[in-house]
Amino acid sequence: MRSRPMLWVTTALVALVTATACGATAEKSDTSNADSGKPATGLRLMVPNTAGGGYDTTARTAAKVMDDAKIATGVQVFNLPGAGGTVGLQRIVNEKGNGKLAMQMGLGVVGATYTSKSKATLTQTTPIAKMIEEAGAIVVPKNSPYKTIQDLVTAWKANPKGLAVGGGSSPGGPDHLLPMQLAQAVGINPKDVNFVSYDGGGELLPALLGSKIAFGASGFGEFLDQVESGQVRVLAVTSEKPIDALKDVPTLKGSGIDLVFTNWRGIVAPPEISDGDKKVWIDALTKMHDSPQWKAELQKHGWTDAFVTGDEFGKFLTEQDKAVADILTKLGLAA
């Protein structure tokens, strides 16, 4: 799939991650490179889900751009999946003071802290930067009887439990929150939704193509290759305005459904890192954001630029946490 290159972690790296997952000590940080204008070195970026997913794509793209633009050299990206991203979150919280480590995350991790009853919370981390937003999409296989979003909604309202919707995230993640909010918007009780959770788009797509589910809800970028090859049809996107990469696909709002939904991705660091280390990360990501290479990647993946850093990102995280908690409480998935 276009936005999910399958870049696998080596056995040696997995062993290294496992060996250092608990009780790791913070590395001594060196901020002299940032102060001298030289590329930052020694940075490590954790992806809290499997290789090939949206977080993985974003992290590896950012690392490559920083390396190509000589902003940061040798940024190590590694995967530590589990419990919707909260295994990685716990690792970040455990790494208190380690200014060389950060974690790629997003809306899915916010929800997973509730549904997985995580002891670690995002409020314990150091907010670094919000990077991108990505619209969702409602997708059906090519042989689906539903030709428009109105066709699908009519059938769904008639038999909400009989039409399975699949998403590439666990309950509380964006692919779960999207169909729940869509159900509310069209008058379906979210508790009646037959949601099937898959571990990322790598599992969601075969289920969709094999008609194991009636429709899928995920980031539109997950399906671009399959749209171009005619394997799937996108019935609607969830953005405010139509997507350039899918010019002929209507928005939900344009189809008479009052819903706008966007997923987002950002980066957080461990608690209690130094001001100097925080500056290294923010400066590197700001330079990356301003680079022509990153602008090209935004265009390539259909990502929306949503860059904010530090305290502004922290305020956004607090707002997102409350909004997600409210939704999941209504669904009985959060206390």
Image (cartoon, rainbow, N blue to C red):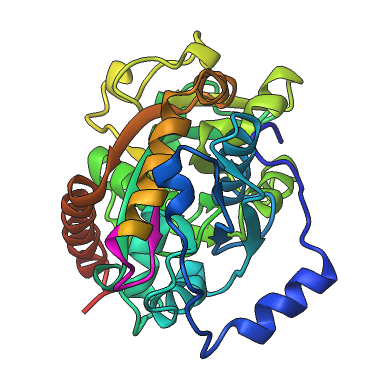
- Side (left or right) of 75 relative to 302: right
**Quadrant of the image occupied by residue 250:** top left
Is residue 31 or residue 162 the one in the foreground? 31
Give coordinates of residue 136: x percent, y percent: 44, 35
- Side (left or right) of 24 relative to 141: left
Give the residue displayed 60% in from the left and 34% down from the top.
Answer: 70
Q: Is residue 180 magenta?
A: no
Region in magenta: 265-275
Task: Say whether residue 193 is visible.
Answer: no
Give coordinates of residue 260: x percent, y percent: 28, 32
Q: Does 204 appear above or below 325?
A: above
Q: Is residue 271 magenta?
A: yes
Give coordinates of residue 309: x percent, y percent: 28, 43
Give coordinates of residue 194: x percent, y percent: 46, 59
Give the residue displayed 41% in from the left and 50% down from the top.
Answer: 281
Is residue 130 or residue 16 the one in the foreground? 16
Is residue 150 or residue 135 the one in the foreground? 135
Task: Say whether residue 286 is visible.
Answer: yes
**Quadrant of the image occupied by residue 110:** bottom left
**Quadrant of the image occupied by residue 147:** top right
Quadrant, the N terminus: top right
Give the residue displayed 43% in from the left and 45% down from the top.
Answer: 34
Give the residue displayed 50% in from the left and 54% down from the top.
Answer: 162
Is residue 247 or residue 107 the one in the foreground? 107
Outermost residue to the top: 248
Outermost residue to the right: 11
Quadrant, the C terminus: bottom left
Q: Does 35 appear above or below 303?
A: below
